[in-house]
Image: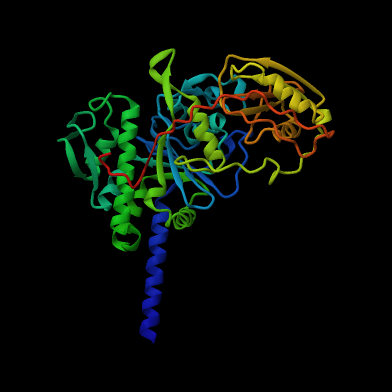
Amino acid sequence: MAGGTAFVVVLALAAGFVWWRLDGNISRLDISQALSSERPTVAEGPLNILLIGSDTRVGQDAPDAGKVSGARSDTTLVAHLSADRKHVTLVSIPRDSMVPMPPNCDAKVPKSEWPVQQFNAAFSLGGPACLINTIEGNTDLFINHFAVVDFNGFKGMVDALGGVPVCTPVAIDDPKAHLTLAAGRHVLTGKQALGYVRVRYTEGDGSDLGRIKRQQAFLSSIVQEATRTSLLLRPDKLYGFLDAATKSLTTDEDLGLGTMKDIADSVKNVGVKNVAFVTVPVETYPEDANRVQWTDAADTLWQRLRADQPVTGKPKPSASPSASATPLTVSPAKVSVLVVNATGTGGLAGQVAEALRVQGFARVTTSNTTERPTGVTVAYAPGREEAARTVAAAFPDAKLSEDAALDATVRVTLGAGAPAVVEVPNRLGTDPIPKPSVSAPAPSTSIEARTADQDICS
């Protein structure tokens, strides 16, 4: 009995040492003071984790979140874990995307004054905080955690798995990536894998989009290999993998090893078929053919994630806008509304305005714009959020956005896919909402996704 007790104590001490060692490997960064004060609403249940592949470990050259000299975000993904932990979606954001960004990473500047810049400049200018502010400002998706993976540590992770299978349809000979491969299937070492995910100029069309496809296929292969080898049930392999991973990792202060374990446990039964990889839909940027801009389909992608819906298959029907919302505090009689038709469909703004008037909204005017967004955006001046919530209740899945340029009037912008007006819970009067005679055009919803169970040669 004494011998058995001693054995248990030794095992506990060993496990404690391993945990201490792995947790101590992780570098942590407090970015709380650099984040915008106007962040999106935190959704309960789902988790959004920003994953950054960098060529320089954060904190190695700079002690704080605002200064990350020499670091570049070669790869940026948003990992969305559904509230029921039945789906995981990994969204790749092209580094060449032209998006509004806080000038000099100053989160205090209103979004309406953000200049358009190349996406991967955010991390170089201001580290994870600037990148999170940029993503949240353009997607209205709350980022719960971030993790920066140094590419040098990436090699050890692959070697700990015993190599990762890949499939290349054409031969690769890239001196910059230090990689030479014949066409076909290969099992790559860590050094080869690092070159493979960074190949850009000598394979395919040389664009970042081609590299993203290879990276997604490679990540699919890692998921398949970890599942095939039962990585979680092999302490020898698991420790080597985690040791390499944590040595190359920088996270926010709340993403410690314990939190990572809880997250891993929560998704262990997801299954490879429910792990989806998707790239933000883009098109050529008009002012520079070497850059891209997000399309309307990108709005659809972010909207699905905000609604905690999988990107593959048909979206789940939305719940009634008042089913779980906080009770409205401002009467329609105290709200002035400007309805902007951004669809090109004649008569839509007038139809929506009348549907609001019969519910008691005080003053409703209309206008048009040549911009072509997706969905409905309800914009409001600082301090007018409660009034905006009353308006947004009339539009299922509407996006709320603060705009310092506005006055007391709440602006509703109708884009492709805008739904018909519904009754707000605190409406005035009893006249029925007029039956709509026109509707917004359907949005472009072409979201291409691959799942982790697909053949790596596909």
Q: Is residue 12 above or below residue 363?
A: below
Q: Residue 334: x and y, percent?
A: 83, 29
- Give whichever of 158, 445 is nearer the camera: 445
Give x and y (percent) for residue 134. 52, 30
Q: Position of residue 59 (x, y in %)?
A: 43, 39
Most extreme residue toward the left is 182
Q: Nearer the viewer, residue 436 or 204?
A: 436
Q: Quadrant of residue 288?
A: top left
Q: Is residue 272 visible?
A: yes
Query: Relative to 364, does residue 393 appear above or below in the rendering?
Result: below
In percent of width and height, residue 70 lies at 38, 30
Which residue lies at the image location 38% right of the left edge and 61% below the top edge? 18
Instruction: Identify which residue, 135 or 346, lies in the foreground.
Output: 346
Q: Is 453 positioned to the left or the right of 123 in the image?
A: left
Tell me what residue is drawn at x 52 percent, y 30 percent. 299
Looking at this rendering, what residue extends furthest in the top direction? 287
Q: Residue at x 70, y 22 (%)?
A: 351
Q: Nearer the viewer, residue 401 or 190?
A: 401
Q: Looking at the rendering, in which quadrant would you find the N terminus?
A: bottom left
Residue 132 appears in the picture as rendered? no
**Which quadrant would the C terminus be assigned to in this image?**
top left
Instruction: Please give the name of the residue rendered at 83% of the width and 35% of the height, measured from the top-left corner.
Output: 430
Quadrant assignment, res 415 = top right
